Image (cartoon, grey):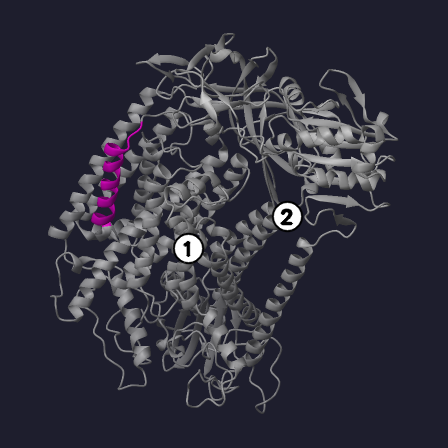
Amino acid sequence: MTDVRVPETDPFDSAPADSGGPPRPGPGSPAAGPFGLADWLKWAWRQLTSMRIALVLLFLLALGSVPGSMLPQQGSDPVGVQQYFSSHPALAPWLNHLGLFNVFAAPWFAAIYLLLFASLVGCVVPRTFRLAGSARTLPPRAPRNLSRLPRFAEYATSLPPAAAAEAAARVLSAHGFRLRRPTAPAGPAGTAAPAGTADSGGGPGAGDRPGDPEEHWISAEKGYLREAGNLIFHLALLGVLVSVALGGLFGYKADRLLVQGYSFADTQSALDEFHPGRLVTAADLPPFTITLNRFDASYISSGTQRGQPSSFDAQVSYTAQPTGPVRSARIQVNHPLSVDGASVYLIGHGYAPEFKVTDARGQVVYNGPQPFVAGATGNFLSQGVLKVPGAQPEQLGFTGVFVPTAVDIGGTLESVFPAADNPVVSLIAYAGNLGMDTGVPQSVYQMDTAGMRQLTASPLLLRIGQSAKLPDRQGTITFTGYRQWVSLAITHDPGQLPALICGMAALGGLLLSFVVRRRRVFVRARAGQDGTTMYVGGLTRTDASGAFEEEFASLAAELRSAHHKAAQDHAAPPHIPAAPTPPEGE
Amino acid sequence: MFKAPVWLAGRRTVVLAAAVLAGVLLIGVLVAGWATGGHSDVTDVDGSQSAVMYTAGHRPVAPEFTGTTLTGARLNFSSYRGQVVVLNFWGSWCAPCRAEASTLASVAALYRSSGVAFLGVDVRDTTASAEAFARSFSITYPSVADPGSAITLDFTSVVPIAATPTTLVIDRTGHIAGAVFGSATYPVLTTILAKVTGKTAAVAVSR
Amino acid sequence: MPVNLALGHVSNDFLIAALVIYSLSVVAFAGDFAFGRPRRAESSGRVQLAQQRAAALATVGTAGSTATAVPADAQDAAGSGAVGSAAVGSGRTDSMPEVALPALRAIGAAGRWVQAAVALSAAGVVAHTVAVVTRGLAVHRAPWGNMYEFVTALTCVAAIFFLYAMIRYRAWMLGVFVMGAVVVALGLAETLIYTAAGQLVPALQSYWLDIHVTAMTLATGIFFVAAVLGVVYLILDRYAKRVAAGRAQPGHPIVGRLPTIEQLDRLTYRTVMFGFPVWTFGVIAGAIWADQAWGRYWGWDPVETWAFITWVLYAAFLHARATAGWRGRRAHYIQLLGFLSLTFNILVVQVFIAGLHSYAGVS
């Protein structure tokens, strides 16, 4: 990122962040010549990759996500979108134009994160080059005046400067620092330096004159991993974006409601919903078939959590291909079935009461289950419709409520427990034209009563096995029993594993960049009249957390004690037990 | 601090970024074009994508299947080899199927004497409702029950059956010659049958 | 497995005890303000020296180096002598950066009120932790499955984290604010959103639940501390600006005892730096859990969306600290905005906006 800090206050860099060439005039600068398209592009690019713009884009990303959580979204709640249109007829079309009913697929949202990632790439790539470059070069030479550094320590030792510098080098090296020593005294200037002590190109006149016998210093640097971690984090975010795109291109989601005892094949016309990725066709669906043999839901029967479900369990048998062997499996919540690259999840369940309808002519025109859907009232009080278009002479239709554990409370039938301990069905019968003959597709769960007349004034209440004769000799309906149904989600997402890997890499990079600090420590030893003065200076790049302070303090103390110990060893000949000599400078 | 001169890193970045951007755009354009492209061995019948005919030599083979009819009899599709078969995927719950039902019944009657057999595949349905449907529209040709969509699955592997209803026209050699995705209308169905049997509706009815 | 109601009651008793002990610790912290030893934070001496050097660095080349006097009451800056100027080679006196006193000695040196406050805080943390643990034992699962449990757990995390930070960075003058906030949050949890111990809906029975919600609880507790510190920062910053403008007297009895702006800024930054990876991990773990339960790892569910918004805002805070013109006050506004979105997520989105996440157990 183009650090907008003033170069002079960043002592870490020997040169300002983006210098090195002739100063680039901005647009409108009087020093500029003709400011062509290329210059405008460069200026725009520099703006895009600046931290300020990255901040603005981050804000926009957060702000843009807000309507996506407040308004119903087309992808997850299309029914809610329809309801919003009907309840806000004036406002809804405008919101729709702005793309607010499908925020996360809207072009403007895509523009925000694409710009953000462009900014990210534009920052990360040059920094990667810079990191590679700086990782190959040695730390810069120690400045002459270490007291100007943010962290500074000074003490005296009796060791000669050369030995002191070497002792310091040992201590720093033991801490994992990368060292640079002064170039060996050589002849005329311009002789090639020995390998490993290459000059980093500090300007003329800075640092030592080679061969100056009075100057001994060590430069130490550590913490290159911080920048590497930072780059890994940002690149991994890019990887997450690519993984999401992969899933959007090559993945799909499908839903299917399956009644106990029935089976379905994984083909587009047999699915209730199919949302393919952009590059996915129905032919990519794996050709498995699943039969729901049994479904059990158990509920807590006592205590404060009475009525809460404690387990869902679907026992299925399936074939991966039409000609393959039949296998059995259990699908539970959090335990999907994996078949041929797709995963089948148990998402929900409900009741499907079974009816037998006989029409006016005595023919059995309906005999089977009809799924009802649980409403918001709780305890699986379920609603549904039963459409009998084959009834003659008039089509029949019923709207109904299935009450699993029915108790009459104050005249209304309520469900007090989600298990079907006392199932009762309450129906209102209609006769007339269901509106299906025009060919316009209808939902199986909704009935248009516009062309029908209500046959019964009050609802018909039926227990299992009971029948009711319909008025006007329209026929009879029998509540023959009930089954349970499950809703299955079939998904395939090739970007799932890459997204996980990139997410973990992002986390790793983040931790690295937070924990590791890039820091430099310089040690100078200057000989004086009574011993050597040691100057220790340290600085760290963007130490916004202040932890380097303590590290430097302990390093300085360690250096001093190492010099102290080395001075004692140096002063005392090894074969005489050392008499404690007063340490210098204390 | 840098090994390489700084100005080179700056220019390199711009070039790299421009190259990446151009590459992404190019790939995006190619992918978009590919994803929305169609097939060349399929021609439209009535100008829309809802009915197609397969040119001879490029016709997919209709899969074999056996099943139980609504009356309970066993049926083997291979017994239809040698006839032109109109295979109609339908369900009693399906409103567009009701819209096309009388068309199918009358075209079936029209072409019966020309050696065209109609066969229904009743998907996701129950027997009572299906029989009531057939009674309502006086459909006399048989239908095979396919409650688990297994037959549909087999056919979807050769023809993209996306929804119900779908009507396939299978030639005498057992290859799928035409398909109607959605409600079959009289002009579309008769056009396809005319091409497959060589007999137009007028000729068929006069026989 | 049936719920152990006896342990549930034990948990509640310990929580009340923790609430009482925390309240007493807040009183002790306040007492330190009113009656304690008059001094600034111990580490401020060192920081000031470093600041002076940095300031001198910037002024080198302009009219001479400024001779800055070390504050007279910085007796904790042991051994630093009289080195105030940026001059080079100032004699043979050693100038060593100070290595911090051990924590207990520092607490002892800070006076009786601080000792009492720290001890009470520690005791409160112990009681709080016992409350959380026994709740978990009572319900045979991780004790953060509904709103009440979540708030008690996150305040426990906040208290533990602050206890550690307070001792490590000698930041007990911040105790009245952080512990006060903990008391308020716990009190609200106890009175407004209490739910008896119970089992979870099976849709949530997964070990990834424990990992995800644990991480979110930890991160929220840490961000809670950061938010309190951010508020204190804003108060301090406003006061400092008013002093600089001459509109307020320096040496305010409360504000004058707080750490310096820079220390507070750094402490807040470190806190967010601690919490941000935990939040990131929590989001990833949540995605893994969502994939197992619902078949997709990210569906822009309202709770997911707001967790994402929170993440983006904290990322913006971390970016802002590296951007000129956005450090200081503005950055802390961003951080507080992030915490607001986090709170909004917990209190409003999860309860009222329907989505797959609805499990708060609030009637």
Q: On the rendered structure, is A276 left or right of A177?
A: right
Which type of secondary structure does the marked residue at label 1 adopt? helix
Above/below status of A131 relative to A485: below
Q: On the rendered structure, is C163 left or right of B169?
A: left
The amino acid type of the residue labelled 1 equals Gly
Q: Which residues are magenta?
A: C175-195
Q: Which mark is residue A250?
A: 2
Neighbour class for label 1 at 10 Å: few (<14), some, many (≥20)?
Answer: some
**Residue C184 forms part of the magenta stretch:** yes
- The foreground one among A299 and B30 is B30
Q: What secondary structure is the magenta-colored segment mainly?
A: helix
> Percent from the top left, x then y, of residue A123?
51, 68
Query: Is disc 2 on the same chain as disc 1?
Result: yes
Q: Which mark is residue A64?
A: 1
Q: Chain of mark 1?
A: A
**Residue C188 forms part of the magenta stretch:** yes
Q: Chain of mark 2?
A: A
Marks 1/2: CA–CA distance:
26 Å
> Percent from the top left, x then y, of residue A132?
58, 69
Quarter of the view holding residue B14: bottom right
Is the C terminus of chain A in the top left, top right, bottom left or bottom right quadrant?
bottom left
Whether residue A538 appears in this view of the structure is yes
Above/below status of A266 relative to B15: above
> Percent from the top left, x then y, of residue C282?
45, 44
Quarter of the view holding residue B205: top right
Q: Say which label, 1 or 2, has the lower sequence index.
A: 1
Q: Residue at x 41, y 90 (%)?
A: A30
The amino acid type of the residue labelled 2 equals Phe
